[in-house]
Image: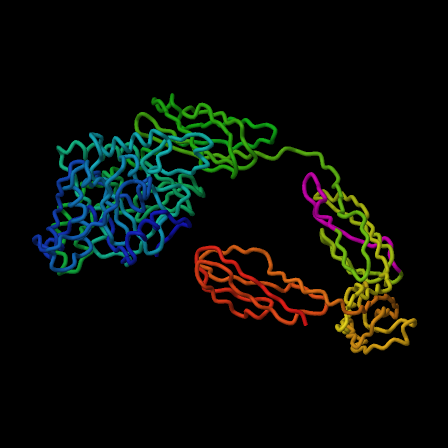
């Protein structure tokens, strides 16, 4: 079983860019483990080098950072995937592969283009990182994702600094990502940091025994112990002892297995992580078994092979003295407080039993923030290291504080208290009712109308909207919903008045009204339009008249073309007289008047007249129009030649296009038409001529 968080680190993108397929990591802290089993499977360099349980790497920090990535992620430095030596005859087992990756990084220089400063393991792939700076490669927590395991080991720092010095310096800055805390708490005031790699609000990965191989069950015991004369290693352990004393826990933030969450007070929600029965803290603040031998985990055949390696690399452990439980004998009590805005200050006082005089020791106090309301915070704390603290600039909501009391003789105690900041008392004001629009007019056939009361306001909140009809046409009795926006279907013309009543959280009401006028639909008579007058020159004696410019507010249902009464004796043939287009033919010289009558759906009608002038032939010469000059750009090597604007009083009989000049002979398609296409053009200037002939 694996508990995972809800965030995805950018490292996932980095790892995806490095490889397209991964295998699940199934070793835990294998980077710092060398088992005898692997010694036997890879006794020489045939698989990339033997596994040495005593790796000589004096600058390396002997700690595996679980679920951690470099602080600057992809920008931390140059990532290079570790590849086994080319002379390897078979693939390395996972633990041997990881160990050889770490050993190869140790052997590289700390500076230069081939340097290796940090080892990163992601999905069974091992990477060497050449860091831009030490700070860029300091570990940063990430939320564990399913089937993913990320580990980091700090190997070779740049320059003369040591990793413990860099970690301490980063922690002192109060924003070190290797020591994550609730960001909102840090925004409220700065808290002292300790070396704890679990954020309060981060879910802790939990692994069942079946998730990892047998050798991993006591992986923490197999982290090799530094030599007595190894100054750097002893400095690391001292840093762990002084900075990793407690890890807080609760129901939502459990302790890492096998630790248990023990409440500090009866029925308390929060507590501290402790080792269960049969386990003790080692020097790296890990829970390891105190008395059960490693061979008890193994089968009878494996026991003899594994016992030596386990005992050789296990840290010193000892049964905790009985006094460890007795040292916690300071009973601390703090009274929770309640304050109402605009008051923003409160004082919390810690009382101890025994007091300093009775216990004959000096107590040290440390107040820390456990939780606070969401949103921007400007609160401050004073006298954080005294028995009384003053809190100011508090915001509305619930704060939880913890005070830890320690004595010079090693005794300690702690307690929590709540500070509740209540909202400011208010004098209730009646709601302000607003209907939009207040007045409106709609004209049939439109029947839909909307009244919006959602912009009504109250000093607290509105709990109910009630609509009712004050007046309207006879028979209009709708059931109106109690919503802030009312949609209406008003099918009857007339005047409507609606009333909106709103109720606030204190049952205070207020109301206002809005009116809607629904106007009866007006049907206007159509407007006939017979088109423009026409002039014809014989022998052209036919034309089509167009009445589509006629209009109506609804629809024209009938068309009728006739000759004017004054032209009854004139000869003309008329076709399609019941359509918008009438065709006239066999017209004679003179003037004709035609009448168009249009009728709408309600029987209303309108008429319009148009004149047609038929004149004798003039036999004027035609006028050729070759169109405007045209420019085209290669690769388009064609252009249209348009002579359709050419005119003649009788009519044009023929067209002829020909080329006058140009860089080559163009091909003219449809040269005998009014519109021709000149193709096969090349770079240059062409000139074309159009000749037209009348009938």
Asked if one can make out residue 599 in the rendered structure from this viewpoint, the answer is no
Front-lying residue, 495 or 527: 527
- Indicate the quadrant containing the C terminus: top left, top right, bottom left or bottom right: bottom right
Q: Residue at x 52, y 55 (%)?
A: 631
Res 303 quadrant in image:
bottom left
Res 511 quadrant in image:
top right
Left or right: residue 271 versus residue 560 is left
Front-lying residue, 200 or 694: 694
How many numbered marks appear? 0
The x and y percentages for residue 438 are 79, 47
Magenta stretch encompasses residue 241: no
Left or right: residue 44 versus residue 631 is left
Q: Is residue 437 above or below residue 530?
A: above
- Indicate the quadrant containing the N terminus: top left, top right, bottom left or bottom right: bottom left
Q: Is residue 681 above or below residue 281?
A: below
For this orientation, the residue located farthest to the left is 44
Q: Which residues are magenta?
A: 452-473
For this orientation, the residue located farthest to the right is 566
Left or right: residue 3 versus residue 232 is right
Q: Is residue 54 above or below residue 657?
A: above
Front-lying residue, 84 or 566: 566
Left or right: residue 105 versus residue 143 is left
């Amino acid at each position: 079983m694996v508990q995972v968080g809800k965030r995805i680190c950018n490292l996932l993108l980095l790892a995806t860019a490095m490889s397209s397929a991964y295998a699940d990591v199934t070793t835990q802290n294998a980077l710092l483990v060398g088992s005898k089993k692997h010694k036997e499977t890879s006794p020489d360099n045939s698989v990339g080098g033997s596994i040495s349980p005593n790796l000589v790497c004096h600058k390396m920090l002997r700690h595996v950072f679980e679920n951690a990535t470099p602080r600057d992620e992809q920008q931390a430095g140059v990532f290079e995937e570790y590849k086994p030596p080319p002379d390897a005859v078979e693939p390395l087992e996972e633990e041997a592969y990881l160990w050889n990756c770490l050993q190869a990084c140790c052997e590289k220089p700390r500076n230069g283009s081939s340097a290796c400063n940090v080892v990163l393991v992601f999905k069974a792939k091992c990477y060497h990182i050449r860091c831009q700076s030490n700070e860029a490669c300091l570990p940063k927590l990430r939320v564990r994702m399913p089937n993913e395991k990320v580990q980091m080991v700090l190997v070779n720092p740049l320059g003369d600094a040591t990793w413990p010095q860099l970690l301490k310096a980063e922690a002192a800055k109060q924003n070190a990502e290797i020591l994550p805390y609730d960001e909102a708490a840090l925004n409220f005031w700065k808290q002292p940091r300790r070396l704890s790699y679990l954020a309060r609000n981060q879910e802790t990965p939990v692994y069942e025994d079946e998730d990892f191989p047998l050798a991993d069950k006591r992986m923490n015991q197999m982290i090799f112990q530094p030599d007595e004369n190894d100054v750097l290693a002893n400095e690391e352990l001292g840093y762990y002892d002084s900075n990793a004393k407690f890890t807080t826990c609760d129901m939502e933030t459990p302790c890492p297995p096998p630790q248990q969450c023990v409440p500090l007070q009866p029925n308390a929600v929060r507590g501290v992580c402790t080792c269960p029965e049969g386990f003790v803290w080692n020097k790296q603040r890990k829970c390891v078994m105190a008395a059960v031998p490693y061979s008890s985990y193994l089968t009878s055949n494996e026991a003899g092979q594994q016992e030596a390696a386990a005992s050789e690399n296990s840290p010193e452990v000892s049964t905790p003295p009985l006094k460890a439980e007795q040292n916690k004998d300071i009973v601390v009590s703090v009274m929770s407080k309640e304050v109402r805005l605009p008051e923003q200050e409160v004082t919390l006082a810690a009382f101890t039993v025994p007091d300093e005089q009775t216990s004959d020791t000096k107590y040290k106090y440390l107040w820390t923030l456990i939780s606070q309301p969401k949103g921007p915070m400007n609160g401050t704390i004073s006298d954080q290291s005294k028995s009384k603290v003053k809190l100011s600039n508090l915001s509305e909501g619930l704060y939880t504080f913890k005070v830890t009391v320690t004595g010079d003789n090693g005794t300690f105690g702690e307690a929590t208290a709540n500070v509740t900041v209540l909202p400011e008392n208010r004098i209730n004001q009646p709601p302000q009712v607003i209907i939009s629009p207040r007045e409106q007019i709609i004209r049939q056939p439109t029947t839909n109308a909307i009244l919006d009361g959602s912009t009504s306001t109250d000093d607290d909140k509105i709990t109910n909207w009630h609509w009712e009809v004050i007046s309207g046409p006879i028979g209009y009795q709708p059931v109106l919903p109690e919503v802030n926006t009312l949609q209406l279907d008003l099918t009857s013309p007339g005047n409507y008045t609606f009333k909106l009543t709103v109720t606030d959280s204190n049952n205070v009401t207020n109301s206002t009204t809005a009116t809607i006028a629904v106007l009866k639909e007006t049907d206007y008579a159509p407007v006939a339009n017979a088109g423009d007058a026409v002039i014809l020159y014989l022998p052209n004696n036919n034309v089509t008249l167009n009445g589509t410019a006629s209009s109506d507010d609804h629809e024209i249902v009938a068309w009728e073309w006739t000759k004017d009464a004054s032209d009854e004796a004139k000869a003309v043939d008329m076709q399609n007289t019941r359509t918008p287009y009438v065709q006239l033919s066999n017209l004679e010289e003179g003037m004709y008047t035609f009448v168009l009558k249009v009728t709408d759906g309600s029987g209303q009608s309108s008429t319009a007249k148009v004149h047609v002038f038929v004149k004798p032939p003039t036999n004027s010469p035609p006028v050729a129009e070759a169109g405007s000059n045209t420019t085209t750009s290669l690769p388009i090597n064609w252009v249209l030649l348009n002579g359709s604007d050419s005119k003649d009083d009788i009519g044009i009989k023929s067209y002829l296009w020909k080329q006058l000049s140009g860089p080559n002979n163009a091909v003219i398609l449809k040269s005998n038409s009014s519109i021709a296409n000149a193709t096969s053009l090349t770079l240059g200037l062409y000139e074309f001529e159009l000749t037209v002939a009348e009938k």
